[in-house]
Image (cartoon, helix red, strand yellow):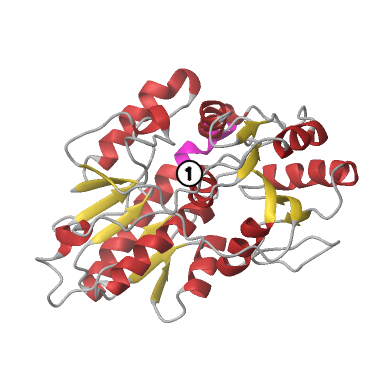
Amino acid sequence: MLNWGLGHATRSQVVIEALIKDGFEVHIGSDGEALQVLKEAFPNLTFHELPSYDIRYSTQLNTKLKLLLQAPGALGTMRREARLIEKLHRDYGFAGVISDNRPAGRVSGIPSAYITHQLQIKAGLISSRASALHAKYYNRFDEIWVPDSEALSLSGDLSSRVTSKVRWLGPLSRLKAVSQRTSIPWAAVLSGPEPARTHWESEILKVKDQLPEGGVIVRGKPSESNVDGMVAYMSVDELSQLYADTDIIIARSGYSTLMDLAHLGKKALLVPTPGQTEQEYLAHKNADRHGWSMGVEGKVDYRKSIGELMNVDAPEALLRSELPKDLFRLFQGKREGGTNP
């Protein structure tokens, strides 16, 4: 099982748990903080560190230009990743590969599935070219697993390029529905790449005293310690309890976050990472749906937005159903004598 980034790591946990339940020997490949989180969640599994893409979102340089300048490095990382996965297969004899948004994560000659909600990529003037390039890679996989449903359509146009290889998984959330223990008016659950995450944290701290008393800030930094009354990171159980106890969640509009919010039926103020076109699209598309509203970093009036959301009814929780029962049929013919990453 291969994944990229914290959001992808958290949604991958649902698939990893299902693989274990189905009797597969699971290997996990990831990097950075995502790798750390998965090691804590599955301490008894085998892990492999993959090359890091280290994509950064600038708060000064135009974001699209920043990403364009990082593209050659990303392609080099993909080549190193592909060579490493081929070597791991020679060493371990995998029955198949499941890759969460790592386009190089496949091995010729064994079954492979690609998890993505981005069959179409939102990237401004280069959207068509970026989507075509992505399709070139994901069409090499045997199946494409989309963590959404046609009826719910959380991902909207992002998953509209449906091919015969697509299987709908439904929204994936590793959070659990638990009983409320206390009452928290709001919680800011920070996430995303640096330096954008730190810049947003500074903005939240500046307005914190203007917001209803008793709010919580989760920094989204699993490798750091709690500081200045803020929580560095929360486990799945801790975050599930926080969601149960909190009226309004302040969060980025990353797709994994939207799945968590929909899963548990939470009201939310969505603040997309500036210049991250996918998050901007998802926030615009889902604003005023599911008890969510949208704000623009640097311009949003947090006090007003939270006040308005307090008068909105909480949405009905979706509470994810089981994954398709035959989801792993792709690997059944290969699992004898092999392992599954």
* 142 is within the stretch colored magenta: no
Task: Compare residues 324 and 125 and report the one nearer the observer.
Answer: 324
Measuring from the top left, give residue 249's x and y in whole percent: 67, 47
Measuring from the top left, give residue 146's x and y in whole percent: 32, 44
Does the rendering let one see residue 142? Answer: yes
Residue 285 position (above or below residue 10): above
Does the rendering let one see residue 110? Answer: no
- Residue sitting at x 32%, y 29%: 160
Q: Is residue 317 left or right of residue 106?
A: right
- Residue sitting at x 89%, y 41%: 210
The quadrant the N terminus occupies is bottom left
- Three-letter residue code for mark 1: Gly
Residue 263 position (above or below residue 17): above
- Residue sitting at x 26%, y 54%: 106
Q: Work out which residue is located at the far left of the displayed protein and give it.
A: 333
Which SS type dominates the magenta stretch? helix
Q: Which residue is mark 1?
A: 73
